[in-house]
Image (cartoon, rainbow, N blue to C red):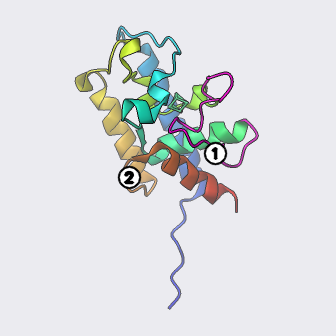
Amino acid sequence: MHRAKKMTPYYEKSAGIAEVETIYKELATRPIERQCILNTGCCHFLQTGETPFLTRGEALVAAKAVRNTGRKELPKRTDGACKLLHPRTSRCLIYEGRPFGCRTHFCQAAGGPYARKEVVDLIHRLEEIDRKLDGTGSKELHEAIEEVLKEQRY
Ligand code: SF4
């Protein structure tokens, strides 16, 4: 028997995107002393040994930001840095839609990672949105965004 893939209705995706964007706005209002100095250290995964993981809602927001740049897929990059880091300008191509992990400054230059207790309520909300969107938990940044971009190609 042929089993159709369960599709998330469009309205759920847009609701998920709106909820995640609200979380990002709330995060920006938290009185946590950090300063991103755009040195892009945290975008060089091979050097840091750390890669952000994204819930499905974050991936939808990031994929929307990629589409807004006119792209339908992630740029190619083979040096172990984030594919969304512009190779010449060294700026994030989706800064407004960058994932939660990129906003919580796990790089030392920005002041080190947020303490989990400072943002744990927001993390729980992202996980809840992931469940509502039939997500399967956090995925590596490129994998998570590419999965959404692939779905949107059809
Ligand atoms: S999404 Fe942007 S901020 Fe996050 S790691 Fe990639 S280039 Fe850096």
Q: Residue at x 69, y 58 (%)?
A: 153
Q: Residue furthest bottom?
A: 1
Kindly identify which numbered label has been placed on residue 54. Answer: none
Q: Residue at x 31, y 25 (%)?
A: 119
Label 2 Cα crowd, 10 Å radius (few <14 / some 14-19 / many 20+): some
Magenta stretch: includes residue 77? yes
Q: Residue furthest right?
A: 70
Figure quadrant of residue 97: top right
Kindly identify which numbered label has been placed on residue 74. Answer: 1
Magenta stretch: includes residue 61? no
Q: Is residue 85 left or right of residue 55?
A: right
Give the magenta range: 69-92
Return the disc, 1 or 2, that comes first in the chain's sequence: 1
Looking at the picture, does residue 105 appear above or below residue 83?
Answer: above
Q: Main secondary structure of the magenta part?
A: loop
Q: Position of residue 19 (x, y in %)?
A: 49, 36
Figure quadrant of residue 101: top left
Residue type at tag 2: Arg
Q: Label 2, on which residue?
A: 131
Residue type at tag 1: Leu
Q: Position of residue 114 (x, y in %)?
A: 31, 20
Judging depth in this view, the residue of 81 and 5 nearest the camera is 81
Q: Residue at x 61, y 54 (%)?
A: 10
Q: Is residue 31 left or right of residue 81?
A: left
Q: Nearer the viewer, mark 1 or mark 2?
A: 1
Q: Position of residue 4 (x, y in %)?
A: 54, 78
Describe the element under mark 1 as helix, strand or loop: loop
Quadrant in the picture for the C terminus: bottom right
CA separation, marks 1 and 2?
25 Å
